[in-house]
Image: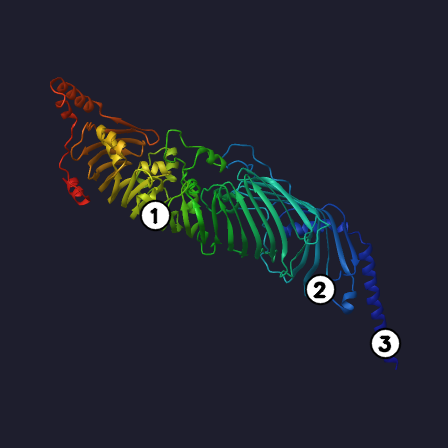
Amino acid sequence: MKPNNKILRISLWLVLGIISLTAICAVILLNMDWNRAKPWLNERTSEALGRPFSIRGNLALSWEKPLSGPETATGWRGQIPWPHLLAQDIHIGQPAGMPETKPASVPASASVQTVTPPEDMAHINEVSFSLNPLALLEKRLEIPLLRFQDSSLSLQRFADGTNNWTFKKSTSSSPWRLELRRLVLSQGQVHYIDAIRHADITADIESLTTEASYGISWKLKGKLHGEAITGSGKAGAILSLQNQIQPFPIMAQLQMGQTKVSVEGSVTKPSELAAVDMRLQISGNSMARLYPLTGIVLPETPAFSTAGHLSATLGKIDNHWKYEKFTGKVGSSDLSGSLDYKTRKADKLRPLLQGNMSSEVLQSADLAPLVGADSNANKLKRGTTAVQPGDKLLPVEAFRTERWRSIDADVNLSAAKLIREKVLPIHKLQTRLILKDGVITMLPLSFELAGGQLQAHITLDGNGGGSSKDKDKDNSKDKDSDAVQAQAIHAKMRVTARHVQLQKFIPTLAASKLTVGEINADANLTATGNSVAVLLGSSNGELSSMIDHGSVSKLLLEEMGLNIGNVILTRLSGDKQVKLNCMLADFAVTNGQMNARSFLIDTDEALIDITGSINMQKEDLNLTIKPNSKGLRVLSLRAPLYVRGTFLHPQISIDKGVMALRAGGAIGLALLSPFAALLPLVNTGPDQPSGCGNLLKAGKK
């Protein structure tokens, strides 16, 4: 019995010793001044983070019963108190060797004073969390709730792509793992500086206590790409990092210049931004102004507004965004559709924009900003410089081709009807726009026009207007010429129009003077330039059109022929129609100058021959119209007409020399015989061929 009693006494002493030791440790832990451990803790943490770390305020440890929650243990485990750590005035410094940067509101090349980075990347007034002591036995740092109070964060990215928020990675694997379940954010401030996007933005965060769905609100202000940006929004207070099936609510509004963006929805798995599900509304003075916010190349447009469903799947490398079932207005035109955007970094490819857009009624005036053809006043409204000279008709606004190489695109566009001013009979407009490697291709652009069909195959190469071999041959250009050449477009255009009815094309003529038959036309041009004016001014190729059969106003014909007697008789008897046999126009285009190879109008009443050229580079007109009447005409003054001047200010004059000779001859004969005086003013007309076939034969001669 004695040995058993001895074992029992030893066991009791061991139990009492363990209990005593635990009690002594608890007393020591409860009464220990943890601030004495700060130097050791600061040093170890600095080494782990690869930057200075310090706790400058109070560091305290208390034991508390774990908060109730879905992850709280039950039974005796739930009765064990957890250590609760509170630290105040925490500073996290910048990484070593962080460079100075220039203000984000100016280009990186500008000569201005540099900005010294702040001493700390982060300052936290107070952080607190509890630690599961039983999880330590499994080498798990389980933190159910991490709370930040009054924190400030300075995030910075530099021109070389490096940043101050990437921490040093450990070279060796650790058996310990961190399990952070929830994060609570309260008041604080975030300052973001980005040398690549020229951003300098500050966001202030405040706690909300009266909102059921949201726990914090925020306001931001600053500059992005040199333009002022403001915004506000709300978000959930508790960010769940483990149970991330539950969406995290977000509502936000942003304004940059005239562009406004608002979103309302949720983020799933917010620690990784794995998915986005939101209602998105966008409005602004031009879609091109969205580039600083989205990085997506969009064309110049009138004022617009759209609303639709925004969703995204965001991975560690690539992101996939969808803007679905959106509707809106662009100018006075309606617009709807869906767009799909993929980053494609894993495949080392440009981002890809795909989708379908359609319009029921498309106003032609809303297409003018695409090529800079709108007025200077409208240019200022959409945020560009008023560059159109007052004496020029062709648009001189330059295309931003350097952005074409930042993205690829494959988008289908369609419009049920296109209207110009009051009416323009264009229906079923369709095209597939492909942007790849800086080259825009329309496959093809087609629509129904005035009872006929027009089809255009257009290619716009934005890679500098030529091949690299051509660029290497000429190294003597100055910097300005090189800059223009870098944004030049090498364009190819092939257009065919078939069975277009001019009366339907110009409906206002139906009740006036002109009712002609079908128009058939072809154009084949190449050009190099950075604007519509430069492209047309450097174009080469040919243009041709033909009108076969129809009718033309006799009054209009007689006025062009200056047959004074017949004009008087026609005005007394009414404007009758004259049969049109053919109209033929054939131009050769060389370096922007259109030279008329054949330009003839044949009717039963007259043959009109038009010669000369049109200079699209100088916007000059140099045409001579020679009307030759058929049959007997009284008081015919068949003097040529000269069309001169510019596109904006054309001038029509008469060959006064011919008129003077005919008038002088009539006066001379009048002295001999009153009847003979009419002979110089009578035109019997030449024997001219009729019909397009005969005109083509005559043109070849």
Three-letter amino acid code of the residue under disc 2: Pro
Instruction: Tell us which disc is closer to us: 2 or 1.
Output: 1
| 10 Å crowding of disc 2: few (<14), some (14-19), many (20+) | few
Spot occupied by residue 173 in the image (x, y as percentages of width and height) = 60, 60
| Quadrant of the snapshot with the N terminus | bottom right
Q: Earlier in the sequence, mark 2 or mark 3?
A: 3
Residue at 71% x, 65% y is: 137
Residue carrying label 1: 449
Q: Which residue is mark 2?
A: 70
Amino acid type assigned to the residue bearing label 3 in the image:
Leu
Judge the density around disc 1: few (<14), some (14-19), many (≥20) Cα neighbours within 10 Å. many
Indicate the quadrant containing the C terminus: top left, top right, bottom left or bottom right: top left
Frontmost of labels 3 and 1 is: 1
User: Which element carries disc 2, helix, strand or loop?
Assistant: loop
Disc 3 crowd, CA 10 A, few/some/many (<14, 14-19, 20+): few
**Which residue does the image show at 54% across and 46% down from the upper left?**
282
Q: Position of residue 404 (x, y in %)?
A: 42, 45
| Tag 3 secondary structure | helix
- Disc 3 to disc 1, how far (Cα)? 108 Å
Asked whether disc 2 touches disc 3, contact meaning CB atoms under 8 Å apart, the reply is no
Point out which mark residue 8 bears: 3
- Chain-order first, disc 3 or disc 1: 3
Rendered position, 11 above or below 564: below
453 left or right, relative to 3: left
Q: CA distance from mark 2 to mark 1?
A: 68 Å
**Mark 1: which secondary structure?**
strand
